[in-house]
Image (cartoon, grey):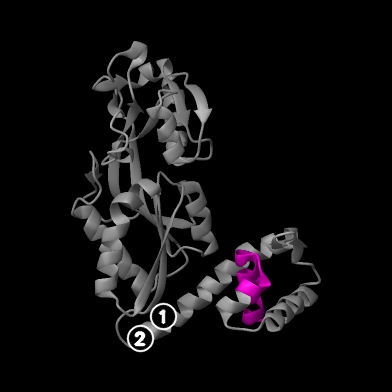
Amino acid sequence: MDLKQLECFVRVVEFGSVTRAAITLNLSQPVVSRHVRQLEVELKEHLLERNGRGVIPTDAGKRLLERGRGILHQVRLARQEIEDLRGSPAGKVVVGMPPSVGKSLTVDLVSDFRAGFPRASLGVVEALTVSMYEWLLLGRLDFALLYNPPVTQQAAYEHVWSEDLYLIGSRGLDGKPMPASVKMRELANYPLITPGQPNAIRNLLDVQCARLGVPLSVALEVDAIESLLDLVDRGMGYAVLSRNAIYGRAHRPNLHASRIVSPSLTSQLVIATVSQRPLTRLAQATIDLIRKRIQGGVLAGDGKRDAPRGRA
């Protein structure tokens, strides 16, 4: 399998167009089409099909797309490691982080990165933990900040932050103000709007409440946090999130957070890497930047930094 063929195929799928892929790759359209066709002949499978808006992958194409992205990423890493030997870190590093963390961290990280590594480029992907964990294993991310990831031998975790979860609402029950705290057993009284499974915070909430025999009333399942908070703001239910989710949101002044107590519900943020995939010098240096920012208090709210730098 030729890497140029694979790259042409991946770019065509990502852009949904041979023409746009050709422009990005600085190749002619016939050359891109020929590379993709040669790949189809080699694999003895149709990888693309046309619709009214361009091209989309077939089932075989979808499988190759995920693997192909990982292969191209690994080739990029190999080139980067060799370039690193010639001086300051170069190449590209891609980091994943939850939207609530990205809101507080991304701007500072980009600023630090550009100042420290002028020859390198940084990609930041914001998504939920479940998606980022999968992308990490596939090689699309160099490392990721994850909330409460699954225990596995495939990944190594460094705990960097802990934060309590809160019940978030625009008003309390019966129109009263939101209380300062809510016992976990009292969550059964609140209609909740939560992300659907699989989701890191939803899983933590389900497991802890099941352990205490607390029946949850899930009124709505909404994965997009901004939409979820909009619904909470309109009084259609309550959310269980970190206070960071509403920190600094002047456009939602009606939202208030009640700490969950007896027992508290705590979410763990970790830096996740793949156990059998060595980090490039650039990736390790980027982790150092993130660690320093977190230790400096860039994450707002009631979080707690973890003193040790061990692996889980």
Q: Is residue 197 visible?
A: yes
Q: Residue at x 30, y 86 (%)?
A: 87
Q: Amino acid at mark 1?
A: Glu
Dot 1 crowding, Cα within 10 Å, few <14, some 14–19, many 20+ = some
Mark carried by residue 85? 2
Give the structural element (helix, strand or loop) at label 1.
helix
Mark carried by residue 93? none
Above or below: residue 30 compared with residue 13: below
Give the structural element (helix, strand or loop) at label 2.
loop
Q: Residue under circle 1?
A: 81
Q: Quadrant of the N terminus?
A: bottom right
Marks 2 and 1 close (CB-CB < 8 Å): yes
Q: Residue at x 38, y 31 (%)?
A: 240
Asked which quadrant contains residue 67, the reply is bottom right
Asked which quadrant contains residue 191, the reply is top left
Q: Is residue 288 visible?
A: no
Bounds of the magenta span?
1-20
Q: Residue furthest bottom?
A: 86
Query: Residue 218 location, x and y as percent?
Result: 50, 24
Name the residue nearer the viewer: 312 or 306. 306
